[in-house]
Image (cartoon, rainbow, N blue to C red):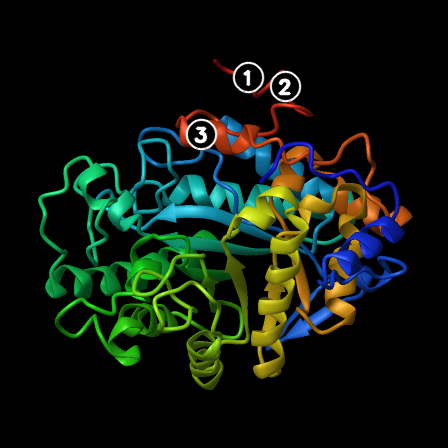
Amino acid sequence: MAQNWFRYRSPEEIRADAKANGVHIPLAESAGVLREKLSFGSVTLENRIGVAPMEGVDSLPSGAPSELTFRRYGRFARGGAGLIWLEATATSQAGRSHRYQLMLNEKTLPAFQRLADGIREEGLRQNGFAPYLVIQAHHAGRMAEGRPMVARFYPGRDEKLRGFTGKLVSDGELEAVEEEMGNFAGLAKKAGFDAVEIKCCHGYLLGELLSAYERPGKYGGSFENRTRLTRNAVKAAKVHRDARFLVTARLGIRDGEPYPYGFGVRKDGGDAPDMTEPVRLVKEFAREGMPFLNLSLGLTLTAAAEKNPLLDLARIADLTGQVKKACPEMTVSGTAFSYFREFAGLHAAGCVEEGVCDHVLFGRMAFADPDFPRELRDTGRIDPGKTCLACGGCGRLIGARKPTGCVVRDRETYPVRE
């Protein structure tokens, strides 16, 4: 994302710039729709605003939440979002991306129970309702800290992996991951979460398999094979599903890689988007009874978009909307709203009003301004003196495996480290 790209002083300036560049940015006249309740399945959320999963890199060595973890989620709970989507939580030590990543197992279960209870209690105390809690089941795959589990070859990237033996993860090892996901779901239910998410995006194990066009065996080649691990992980988690505990997914519908390394792209060797397979997978989730999910995309950062990121942000809304409109039966949470700063609520509301998504998730904005949901509820705007500036500071902390938060708005807790 180009630094200091946001120069807009009004929604009208955003609309004018979008029109001049031949793209459309949804922008509502008010953020009122975000205050509405939202129902799916047996669930009713108090509003359409959610906190997106953003890693805090602050677990204890065991994988249990630390005091910093409790602090972060307590602040999110006080903010008044109807849903809090907890960050990537490892299903096993082998799938852990780093030693400070949360990990849920039998030993850490009591700490996660305290975390879920604490979030609900804080939400009730401050806002009169408990936020709906989703926890993300995660396997790092090629980005695992120990031995990378590489699902498909990627020349130029494979050689940079520490511990990579040059061999693909076996089908048997992938079958074991399916079981891990199911076990994780059972523990998440015991811990008191409302739903478990099967993470399938951003180049991690399940997301990587979506584009394993050239992998041999039952996890590569055809659409059925490439989606097998994700579909089977969802089925394993569904063993624990009931009216109170649901199973969802975070699906990367396009991460900007060209064929044969990218999912959701045309198969002509380029990176032009094609939502045929993402739509097919979402429809399969819906047929299996999944009532809601989150759609995620990576920024493409083409030469034009690097100069004006508005082009990529328009594409994110467009592709998310394509999938939602093709799958109207699925309740969809959209992302990438924080970039619009004090006008982020208007963009999020515009996406809901135009049918791009039903619900909105804010990640970096929650780091910068945990009270943003209350501000949207009370004034319809996010305080411009508190917004995320898209400076990339939190991302650099994550990359450096340091406790992560906003280096601008919360600098005493997360000072800039050289």
Residue 3 visible, this angle = yes
Q: Check disc 2 and report the residue beneath it.
A: 411
Task: Name the amino acid type tagged 3.
Answer: Asp
> Residue at the spot x=36%, y=70% of the render?
234
Q: Nearer the viewer, residue 299 or 252?
A: 299
The disc placed on residue 58 is 3
10 Å crowding of disc 3: few (<14), some (14-19), many (20+): many
Q: Which numbered disc flags the more N-terminal residue, 3 or 2?
A: 3
Taking the view exactly as shown, the residue that stands out farthest to the bottom is 287
10 Å crowding of disc 1: few (<14), some (14-19), many (20+): some
The disc placed on residue 366 is none
Task: Name the amino acid type tagged 1.
Answer: Val
The disc placed on residue 416 is 1
Residue 164, above or below 412: below
Q: Is label 1 or label 3 in front? A: 1
Q: Which numbered disc flags the more N-terminal residue, 1 or 3?
A: 3
Element carrying mark 3: loop
Label 1 and label 2: CA atoms lie apart by: 7 Å
Q: In the image, 246: left or right of 205?
A: right
Residue 131 visible, this angle = no
10 Å crowding of disc 2: few (<14), some (14-19), many (20+): few
> Residue at the spot x=81%, y=51% of the render?
14
The image quadrant where one finds the N terminus is top right
Task: Name the amino acid type tagged 2.
Answer: Arg
Q: In the image, 268: left or right of 192?
A: left
> Residue at the spot x=36%, y=72% of the render?
268
Q: In the image, 87: left or right of 326?
A: left
